[in-house]
Amino acid sequence: MDERQTFAPDAAAIERLADAAVARLPMPFREHLEGVVFQVAEFADQDVLDEMGIEDPFELTGLYSGRPIGEQSSMLSGELPAMIHLYRRPLLDEWVATGVSLEALVTHVIIHEIGHHFGFSDADMHALEDSVG
């Protein structure tokens, strides 16, 4: 992103940052992301917020939905593909509030949600994030 940019990054810009974060992952992780759908929306749907017990939609920056790799089976059919959702407005609010670069913030959220896809612990996710830099 250009330092002189005077407007909020759109969904396509967030998606490009997410793609770049995934491209920096070690190959063994990228191989297992084939078929995972990445989606950028302004906010999480109200049903998602209600299900998670979240009142303020700005509190949720990302979400993994789907069955973790260890629970997947060829016997399961008709399920939606695994998805990683990024929520643009909460990401932008956190970016402004923290001063952390948007690239670093999107990378952090992507790594965390990918971690859920792999069934990782929080410590595993931190180690993966450190390796991506």
Image (cartoon, grey):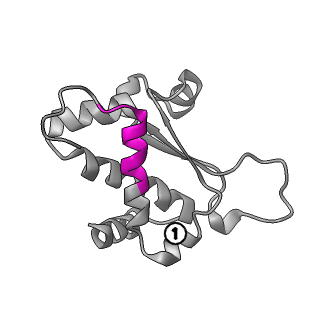
What's the residue at 47%, 53% (across, down)?
113
Up/down of 61 relative to 71, above or below: above
Stretch in magenta? 9-19
Amino acid at circle 1: Arg
Residue 128 at x, y percent in the picture: 37, 70
Q: Residues within 10 Å of mark 1 (few under 14, many from 20)?
A: few
Relative horizontal placement of residue 128, taking residue 115 as reference (left or right): left
Q: Where is residue 36 in the image (x, y as percent from the top left)?
A: 61, 55
State the residue at coordinates (37%, 58%).
Answer: 21
In the image, is residue 10 part of the stretch drawn in magenta?
yes
Residue 77 place in picture, x, y as percent: 85, 54
Asked if the magenta segment contains residue 84, the reply would be no
Task: Give the labeled residue for mark 1.
Answer: 30
Question: In this image, 129 relative to 75: left or right?
Answer: left
Q: Residue at x 18, y 27 (%)?
A: 6
Task: Give x and y (percent) for residue 90.
Answer: 34, 31
Quadrant for the N terminus, please: top left
Q: In which quarter of the image is residue 130?
A: bottom left
Residue 68's quadrant in the figure?
A: bottom right
Vertical side of 12 occupied by 129: above or below: below
